[in-house]
Image: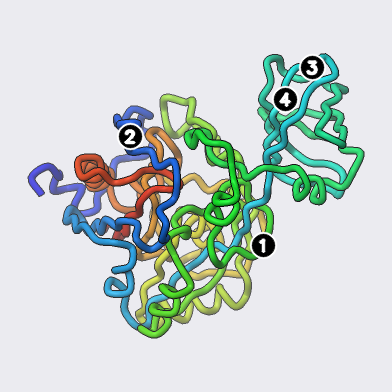
Amino acid sequence: MSDCVDSWCAGTYPVSNDLRLVDFDFELPARLIAQRPLPDRATSRLLHLAGCELTDLHFSDLPGLLHAGDLLLLNDTRVIKARLLGAKPSGGRVEALIERVLTARSALALLRTAHSPRIGQRIDFADAKAIVTARTDDFFELQFDCDVPALLVRIGRVPLPPYIEHTPDAQDEERYQTVYARHEGAVAAPTAGLHLTHALLERLHARGVATAAITLHVGAGTFAPVRAERVAEHVMHAERYRVSEATARAVNERRVAGGRVVAVGTTALRAIESAARDGVVYAADAETRLFIVPGHRFQVVDRLITNFHLPRSTLLMLVCAFAGLEPVKLAYRHAIDQGYRFYSYGDAMLAERAG
């Protein structure tokens, strides 16, 4: 408690325009970057952050932290095999990360290659070919000579984050996916949900905790570095999301009845907050560029389940906005000291909203 400034514990925030990238930096030992999932999803550790109070638990303890009448908000996006390995006619290697399938034969992609491709450049992917037809910022539009979704199923690889160093395998195909994944379109998993199992969800339902689904297709921009030193100058990437009429109604009814809304992951939080106006959630099918930093006033979500995120990332900024910058710094220092596993295959935190 002594490490936590009282004003931060009380939920006061600095003006977001004053925030600098260095405010969200920390040193992480490489040994704490989880390279593989644990054998059992629910055996991950869970750090409960309430103001400046920290409690070490396991994810299987989650039902004891929730009450009848609470609503668990799940992102049911499904990760596609979005990574393609190819080559230019010259032999130069190309790695493509499909950000979004635009039509049956076209897609938007990030391309990793020794030299930036030009418009008209041909890229060969196994038995398929693509032509670079346009570029917008870091993304290239590719026109394929075959059906893109079928190509991804046939030769695509699981798009593991760059800090996971092994080649994707059968274990990743199963575990880099939530057990409730339904709608294909994400190029990164909503990782807070990776800890949930069917058995754990049944325990939560038996306790009177309801669930509702939203869909936010996590894009490649989730790994894009924040380059602006002044946080307010960063331009957030766009992600497609959908909140159904049923989910909007469930959230609104739970809030009126006094139940708490618990977002499983930053993506679920961004989607539901994007669909809210004046504290009321409306059905939506749109794109969001909502950039949540300290100073943001939350309308809907009371508690957040989240993994431990990269330094200087927009995801860490969101968590700091939700739970307070100094409390989150305290939690991260504790997690490092206690050997918690970080990032996508790592452990989790349940954070109470500050203020």
Crowd rating for badge 1 (residues with CA inside 10 Å; few <14, some 14–19, many 20+): some
Q: Could you tell me if residue 275 is visible in this image?
A: yes
Amino acid carrying label 2: it is Arg
According to the picture, the residue beneath numbered tag 1 turns out to be: 183
Q: In the image, which disc is placed on residue 94?
A: 4
- Across and down, in percent, residue 147 comes to 87, 47
Left or right: where 354 falls relative to 41: left
Q: Relative to 340, say whether 128 is above or below.
A: above
Amino acid carrying label 1: it is His
Where disc 3 sits, the SS reads loop
Closest to the observer: 151 or 54? 151
Disc 2 to disc 1, C-alpha distance: 34 Å
- Judge depth for marks 2 and 4 and give the one in front: 2
According to the picture, the residue beneath numbered tag 2 turns out to be: 31
Labels 4 and 1: the sequence-earlier one: 4
- Across and down, in percent, residue 183 comes to 67, 62
Q: Quadrant of residue 76?
A: bottom right
According to the picture, the residue beneath numbered tag 3 turns out to be: 91
Q: Quadrant of residue 177?
A: bottom right
Crowd rating for badge 2 (residues with CA inside 10 Å; few <14, some 14–19, many 20+): few
